[in-house]
Image (cartoon, rainbow, N blue to C red):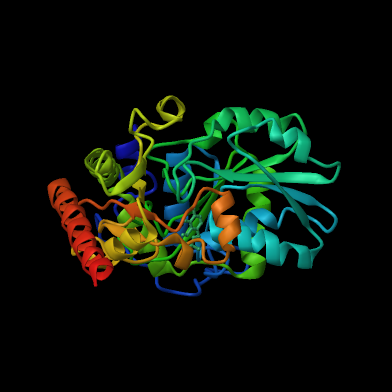
């Protein structure tokens, strides 16, 4: 079976009682034992639940992994990966990383005696300089958040493996529909399933996927011990969303490409960051490792004032955190995804305050383009009035 079919068929046989085509919701914390000799495979929902198991089987199949564990959020999936670290260990983190991961590594891992360093994922040789004898793990992601840089996954894995590191990769931005990092040598793929996998901005969740049985077992045991478990309904909702990932992703990619092309060259725009543009510096790398260029882009305006006005003037794009849902969103990184970084840290990472991150939904692309253009015109008119006053 291929991707779109796997999403609809893996582990989703009609139920044995009534042949329901849609998997029923098992909203039960506990499951009855037939006898003391016959321990059921699922007995308590913190440890496992039929809705969770179904979701894990489908995500594992879509990422090409043997072991998947799902969690109550993407951050819980990342915390589960970090649970493999012990006191005295060191982790390398890409400089271009989601702000929440940055916060966990910088503020919380030191409390468990785990230190960290940075490397530049665009320059895999930087791993050789940053690694220490006690380095155990490396975490990175691509396309990067928010400025959509694309690093070469195989090159980063190859440098990390020279030092025997466990390689963790956050595949949230691309989703398994566009990129399968396990096939490129990554040890653990993490997802915020809150985004493209669930796809409707109505449920939080996370996942880890691996082909290493020992790692898979350790991650499952961690969530059982710490209770970072998603509810049955969260799993049911996530699976409902995941079943349409393939068609949604086609539309996200088409819309983002159309918006990126329409914004490129606009007089109010300094730069458009989208891997699907031929002008994107890593367009060829993206073509090599991705099946599509994704639904995310970033637009750098000629000034912070225009960016702020546009963010507040669009009518279809909503000004909101998050990404990967069916509706289009605009984010202002300094107050949203990257608020925990200082302005200097953001500037070092190429995130000026004139940059807006855009998550393209599945609306008509012409409506999205018209909405951005009208917002830019209104922003320019308002700022002209202010400067003439
Ligand atoms: C790339 C990435 N990873 C992880 C997360 C964290 O996911 P969650 O909000 O589901 O905990 C996010 C959230 O925005 C994200 O964008």
- Name the residue at 33% across, 53% down: 358
* Figure disc tally: 0
The answer to whether residue 301 is left or right of residue 123 is left
Quarter the N terminus occupies: top left
Q: Nearer the viewer, residue 265 or 322?
A: 265
Q: Tell me where residue 238 appears, x and y as whole percent.
A: 37, 59
- Residue 301 appears in the picture as rendered: yes
Q: Quadrant of residue 303?
A: bottom left
The image shows residue 341 at horizontal and vertical percentages of: 58, 62
Nearest the eye: 309 or 58? 309
Q: Which of the two residues, 218 or 181, is positioned nearer the viewer here?
A: 181
Q: Position of residue 305 (x, y in %)?
A: 35, 63
282 to 48, vertically: above or below: above
Above or below, 43 relative to 272: below
Q: Residue at x 77, y 63 (%)?
A: 110
In the picture shown, does residue 134 fall above or below 40? above
Is residue 15 in view from this perspective? no
Q: In the image as oriented, which residue stretches furthest toward the front?
A: 388
The outermost residue toward the bottom is 29
The image quadrant of residue 160 is top right
In the image, residue 252 sits, relative to residue 19, either above or below, namely above
Pinpoint residue 297: horizontal percent, then vertical percent.
36, 46
Quadrant in which the C terminus appears: bottom left
């Amino acid at each position: 079976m291929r991707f779109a079919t796997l999403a609809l068929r893996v582990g989703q046989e009609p139920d044995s009682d009534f042949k329901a085509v849609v998997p029923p919701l098992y909203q039960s914390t506990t499951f009855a034992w037939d006898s003391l000799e016959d321990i059921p495979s699922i007995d308590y929902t913190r440890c496992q639940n039929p809705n969770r198991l179904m979701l894990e089987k489908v995500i594992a199949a879509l990422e090409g992994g043997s072991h998947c564990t799902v969690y109550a959020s993407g951050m819980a999936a990342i915390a589960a990966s970090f649970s493999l670290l012990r006191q005295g260990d060191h982790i390398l983190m890409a400089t271009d990383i989601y702000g929440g991961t940055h916060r966990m590594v910088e503020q919380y891992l030191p409390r468990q005696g785990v230190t960290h360093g940075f490397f530049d994922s665009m320059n895999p040789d930087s791993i050789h300089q940053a690694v220490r004898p006690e380095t155990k793990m490396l975490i990175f992601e691509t396309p990067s958040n928010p400025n959509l840089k694309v690093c070469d996954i195989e090159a980063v894995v190859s440098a990390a493996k020279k030092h025997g590191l466990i390689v963790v990769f956050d595949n949230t931005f691309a989703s398994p529909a566009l990129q399968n990092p396990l096939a490129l040598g990554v040890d653990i793929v993490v997802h915020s399933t809150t985004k493209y996998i669930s796809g409707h901005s109505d449920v939080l969740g996370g996942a880890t996927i691996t082909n290493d049985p020992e790692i898979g077992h350790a991650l499952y045991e961690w969530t059982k011990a710490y209770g970072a478990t998603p509810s049955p309904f969260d799993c049911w909702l996530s699976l409902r969303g995941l079943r349409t990932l393939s068609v949604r992703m086609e539309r996200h990619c088409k819309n983002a490409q159309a918006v990126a092309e329409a914004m490129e060259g606009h007089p109010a725009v300094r730069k458009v960051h989208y891997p699907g543009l031929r002008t994107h510096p890593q367009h060829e790398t993206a073509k090599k490792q991705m099946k599509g260029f994704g639904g995310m882009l970033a637009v750098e305006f000629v000034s912070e004032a225009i960016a702020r006005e546009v963010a507040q003037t669009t009518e279809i794009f909503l000004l909101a955190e998050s990404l990967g849902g069916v509706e289009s969103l605009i984010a202002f990184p300094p107050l949203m995804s990257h608020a925990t970084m200082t302005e200097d840290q953001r500037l070092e990472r190429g995130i000026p305050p004139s940059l807006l991150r855009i998550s393209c939904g599945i609306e008509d692309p012409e409506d999205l383009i018209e909405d951005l253009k009208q917002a830019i015109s209104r922003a320019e008119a308002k700022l002209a009035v202010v400067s003439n006053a």
